Image (cartoon, rainbow, N blue to C red):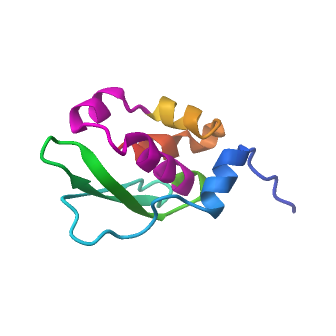
Amino acid sequence: MSRIPLPYSQKVIDLFRNPKNQGKMENPTVTSVAGNPACGDMITFYMKIKDQKIIEKITFESYGCAANIATASIVTEMIKGMSLENTWKELTWKKVAEEVGGLPSVKSHCGILAVG
């Protein structure tokens, strides 16, 4: 029985192979962990926050599929330099999915997980 590959965009494949901002951060201001018990995916985000509540630096660790890693990676790029308030107002899973060139419908939960 052969497996049919999921139709990932080239951006998802690239971010899976070469994720940006991946790794544990020393002495983060904030650590956030999210997981999906249905599929087992997990993401930990580490952030350094400036005095003005600006995300100065963000990294992540991920245990999951290509879509999980790609969406976590793109979130770090999308919110670096943003205020916490604007991040919570403007970041949506749909924007994350658009930013990675779309996600297969069975992987939309990865975008949801990445925005926590």
Who is closer to the viewer here, 105 or 116?
Answer: 116
Q: Is residue 88 above or below residue 39?
A: above
> As drawn, which residue projects farthest toward the top?
89
Q: Residue at x 87, y 63 (%)?
A: 1
In the rendered image, residue 85 lying in the magenta stretch gets the answer yes
Q: Answer left or right for 85 relative to 8.
A: left
Marks counted in the figure total 0
Q: Is residue 92 above or below residue 25?
A: above
In this rendering, does residue 77 appear at all? yes
Instruction: Where is residue 59? Give x, y as percent.
Output: 38, 60
In this rendering, does residue 8 appear at all? no
Q: Residue at x 55, y 60 (%)?
A: 19
Q: Quadrant where the C terminus lies?
A: top left
In the rendered image, residue 36 lying in the magenta stretch gets the answer no
> As drawn, which residue projects farthest toward the left?
51
Instruction: Where is residue 66? Give x, y as percent.
Output: 61, 57
Q: Is residue 115 above or below residue 46?
A: above
- Classified by dominant secondary structure, the portion drawn in magenta counts as helix
Instruction: Where is residue 90? Give x, y as percent.
Output: 35, 27
Q: Residue at x 45, y 60 (%)?
A: 21
Who is closer to the viewer here, 51 or 30?
Answer: 51
Q: Answer left or right for 23 relative to 97.
A: left
Q: Which residues are magenta?
A: 69-92
Q: Residue at x 41, y 31 (%)?
A: 92
Instruction: Where is residue 85? Give x, y as percent.
Output: 22, 32
